[in-house]
Amino acid sequence: MSETASYMLPLGTKAPNFNLFDTVTAQFKSLNTLKGAKATVVMFICNHCPFVIHVNDTLVTMANYYQQRGVNFIAISANDVLNYPQDSPDLMKQQALKVGYPFPYLYDETQDVAKAYKAACTPDFFVFDGGLSLVYRGQIDNSRPGNGIPVTGTDLKSALDCILNKQKISEIQKPSIGCNIKWK
């Protein structure tokens, strides 16, 4: 299991728009139709990455909680499915239903969206405010597979709570660590 750190896109960056295939509903969805009223979490994940599997339950719990408060979550997989068929759209749908994702699980076939966000790993988290300006990017928390630290979502929750409470988010943010995106 190789570890790759997120790129840490500059704070203030505007969220690149997209129109991607939602593997669960079989419809194309855009950022503008999926964004949250108060914030939007765009996360790059995949089916097989042990780092994503490690945080899946916490992602579902967090999304269920924050989506009721105006924060929408959007998951995107950009992995090369020819070399990593376990990340194919059909299996993405199965994974979303099995885990109970309460958010869309979109397929970035061309990998153009992942490149626009400068996503590097799975999971890679980007939080945008109501105006779609980047206010947080980095890890969900300090837990990693095998390090014995429980998954709490502390870092991501802190950023979302600051948005909801109209407080400043710390600019000291740790990169996410995960498997590299499987580029074509």
Image (cartoon, grey):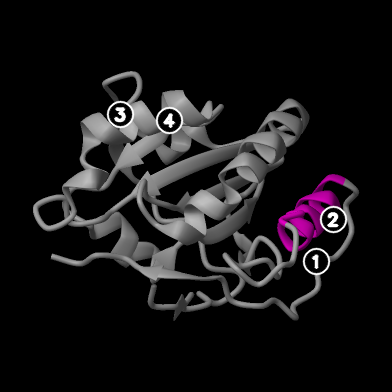
The residue carrying mark 4 is 96
Disc ID at residue 21:
none
**Contact? badges 2 and 1 (CB < 8 Å):** yes
Q: Amino acid at mark 3?
A: Thr
The residue carrying mark 3 is 23
Res 49 visible: yes
Q: Which residues are magenta?
A: 151-164
Pick the quarter of the image with the C terminus.
bottom left
Q: Is residue 62 above or below residue 6?
A: above
Residue nearer the viewer, 15 or 78: 78
The residue carrying mark 2 is 162
Q: Secondary structure at mark 1?
A: loop
Question: In the image, which is nearer the foreground, mark 3 or mark 1?
Answer: 3
Q: Disc 2 to disc 4, how far (Cα)?
A: 28 Å
> At 74% from the left edge and 77% from the top edge, which residue is drawn?
171
The residue carrying mark 1 is 169
